[in-house]
Image (cartoon, rainbow, N blue to C red):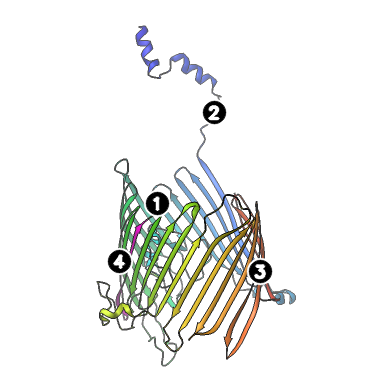
Amino acid sequence: MALCALVPRLLGAQSAEQTAAAQAKKPADAKVRLPLEWSLLWSGAWESEKNISNRGELGISLGQLGFRLQYLERRTAASREAFAASFDAAAEPPPVTDLAAGFYHKSSDTRLLYGKLQRFGLAARAANIWRRGAPYTEARTAPLADLRTTVSSSATPAWYAYLGAPFRLGDDKNLKLFTSLELGVETDDVAVNRVAIRRGGNEPVVSAGVEYSRGKSAVRAEGIYVSRTLPPRQASTWFSVSPSLPERDTRLAGGSLSYSAPRFAVAADAVRSETFAFGRDWYGSLALRLGNKPWRFQAAFDGAGSRYVDPDGSAPGAGFRSAFRLERSGKNASLFRLGALFRGSGPEDAPLNAAGVLQNWGAAAFTKIDRHTLDAYYRFPARKRQSGPRPIRFSLSWAQDRRDLDAVLDTWKASASVGLWAIQAESEGLLALTEGRPGEYRFSEELAYSRGIFKAAAKAGYAAALKKDAWAGAWNASASTSFRWQGNRVTLKAATTDFPREWTYTVSWTLQK
């Protein structure tokens, strides 16, 4: 009997007397606390005689579940003349307001959103292609969407549902299936990149994919389908290059495949669009990364045909781009980087075929480079103590635009930053040459002092341009003060582009709980 009583104690079990004593020590009114957390955020900016913007956000989380309610507003600030003339509020332009909400599940990224959205993944990479940076592997984000944090007068609200299903296959093996659906809300015609788009509830954006990861390596495949209805377009003039077009439907479908590992990564996109009364075309991209630290090399290529229409309904135009980057990371966060970017504008009558090669161009298509940029950057090793003079970073770039052979434009940019105790000085300069003759130059000097939660900065510069064989220039200046603490920020700034006249005053803030 004694042995039978001893075995549960060896296994860590409690006796009946110990259990009763532990329960007696607990208070009678003890309650189970729910993992409920909440947050509030208010941010905005007031710019004299321009705009007033506000963003309010409420967040509530309960374990893995979260809720987010957001209100955005932007209105025109009254000018001095309007105040002096007893400004009539009824004559003020109506503010642009956005109301959005979302439900989230943290571990699976599952979400249900309503509002104006910011897309990521293939849907974002295939839109505004020439306004975005080169599609390197590091720029490829997960295929998601989230609520915008800034007011947009061109975007329209939409419903968005994303379902993620993660599965754990082993100690370091994971599989994730995901799909999403976006449905636009019926609105009036909205101008997006000078193309009017009417978005309705029957115009979906559907995506689906799978991701498999093992340790630090991952493979991801993604597909997308977009449907839009473009309203009629009238020619602006009698001899307009863009003809009048009727109401037409546009469809877009594409896929993406990527593999990433610590020392190697490769990714590719292929998207095909078809628009009634406009035609069909392709957009494609390829990215490669070799190495990680200390040496890393990256390359990216992409191109589009003249009849390609992106997910937002705009036609970015034919062209191709290639970019290269070589980096070396050193001790104490030092970094050396060399970069090169080459751009070419394709002929308007040359669509892309399925292989991504421009028809009618031949083998010399990709040699028609009319723009390029070469740049170098170095960040010096950080010091533990900010004492004495110390270099911080230096950069130099050269860009050339040869689209107009009669006026080849070369632009040189340089910047350098040094530190002296708690003061940081940064110098910037720009020189633009047209056919080897100076056409524009700018230089500026900025001093910044930071200590604790306080930061102050002052900047002065001069900009001049050659207009009608005569130089015209003006001094510019700015001064700012900011306070930062525990994620909060308040900034006061005064700036002018025509010193000492035409000052603009700005107050911005971010307060959160």
Q: In percent of the image, x 35 and y 9: which residue is there?
A: 3
Q: Is residue 432 above or below residue 110?
A: below
Q: CA distance from mark 1 to mark 4?
A: 23 Å
Q: Quadrant of the N terminus?
A: top left
Image position, residue 270 (x, y; %) = 30, 67
Q: CA distance from mark 4 to mark 2?
A: 57 Å
- 258 or 365, nearer to the observer: 365
Sooner in the amino-acid sequence: mark 3 or mark 2: 2
Pair 3/1: label in front: 3
Neighbour tally class for label 1: few under 14, some 14-19, many 20 plus, Cα within 10 Å: some
Q: Quadrant of residue 56 in the image?
A: bottom right
Sooner in the amino-acid sequence: mark 4 or mark 2: 2
Q: Quadrant of residue 122 in the image?
A: bottom left
Q: Main secondary structure of the magenta part?
A: strand
Image position, residue 111 (x, y; %) = 42, 53
Read off the magenta span.
Answer: 270-291
Residue pointed to by mark 4: 254
Q: CA distance from mark 3 to mark 4?
A: 47 Å
- 17 or 419, nearer to the observer: 419
Residue pointed to by mark 1: 110
Amino acid type of disc 4? Gly
Amino acid type of disc 2? Ala
Amino acid type of disc 1? Thr
285 magenta-colored: yes
Which of the labelled discs sits on residue 149, or is there none? none
Where disc 3 sits, the SS reads strand
Q: In percent of the image, x 65 and y 56: which residue is there?
A: 422
Residue pointed to by mark 2: 30
Where disc 2 sits, the SS reads loop
Residue pointed to by mark 3: 478
